[in-house]
Amino acid sequence: MRASPLHYIELGSGPPLLLIHGLFDSLETWSKVLPLLSDRFKIVAIDLPAFGKSALPDRWTESVSGMIGAVAAFLDQKGIEKISLVGSSMGGSLALGIGERYPERVDKIVLLNPYGLPSIPAAVAAARNFLLGNLLPYLLIKPFLRRCAKILYRRSLYDQTLLDEILIDRVILPYSSLRRRRDLFRFLKGISPEEIMKIDHLLPAIRRPVLILWGENDRWLSEAHLARLQRRLPQSRVIKLPSCGHLPQMEKPKEVAEAIFSHIPCE
């Protein structure tokens, strides 16, 4: 499988830092954090395949492992040998997968409410259902898509004032075409419980320092998930963020930036 070029933005100067968004999101999720980090880091934020402005390759037979490979290929194309990773939700799981597969290329890791190991998102279960997986790309026309996006982000955000029409428009724009919706479901169908378990099994082997930023009001993930993740990651430490949901980069950008500065020295 040949990796398609990833859409990305690049700004700032200093040690390199790769920002990886989560499921049903894009690099725009980092908009409040970017100006806070770019004075001290060379920031690279990407749209993963099938998300934002990045296409999914026509021949796509892998899912999480394919995403990990796509990020590694992107770093190769950019000539980046070693970099620190910041991953939100599913992007946190990918950051851990990259750290497992390419330990020599990863300096430090920051996870923002990292999703789901060893479970899989409900959307994946729906996509892997033969009937739903084939029908939903056709049913998700704009009004239904808007409704789904509002439900998704209402649960993701503690501060409901952030849930405005601008955010919803940004979230649904990549899926305005049937092809992009079908690409999304092709990606989701490829996520297998076996693949997720394989990543989870290897977590204790990660020896890079890991910082977990945890929005305490996450309605997707429980404290039990956080406790299990800590046990699986021997080099991890946790900073909890009160009055914050599943997306700290949107709700607590200053706190996120300060925590990254403390974890990844810029000298």
Image (cartoon, rainbow, N blue to C red):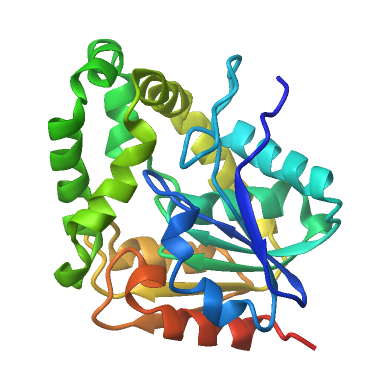
In the rendered view, would you say 245 is above or below 37?
Answer: above
The N terminus lies in which quarter of the figure?
Answer: top right
Residue 78 shown left or right of residue 24 in the figure? right
* Position in image of residue 256 (x %, y %): 47, 79
Q: Is residue 205 above or below residue 122?
A: below
Which one is in front, 121 or 224?
121
Along the horizontal axis of the image, is 150 left or right of 259?
left
Along the viewing direction, whichever of 69 and 48 lies nearer the viewer: 48
Examine the rendering and report whether any part of residue 96 can be seen. Answer: no
Quick one: 117 or 260, which is closer to the camera?
260
Q: Which quadrant of the figure has residue 163? A: bottom left
Residue at the image position 44 percent from the left and 51 percent from the top: 22
The quadrant in which residue 57 appears is top right
Q: Residue at x 41, y 28 (%)?
A: 184
Q: Position of residue 233 (x, y in %)?
A: 58, 65
The total of numbered circles placed on residues is: 0
Q: Is residue 4 above or below residue 90?
A: above
Q: What residue do we see at 42% from left, 55% from top? A: 89
Quadrant for the C terminus, please.
bottom right
Locate residue 111, reporting x and y percent.
51, 66
Question: In the rendered image, which quarter is residue 138 located in?
Answer: top left
- Residue located 51% across and 56% down the image: 92
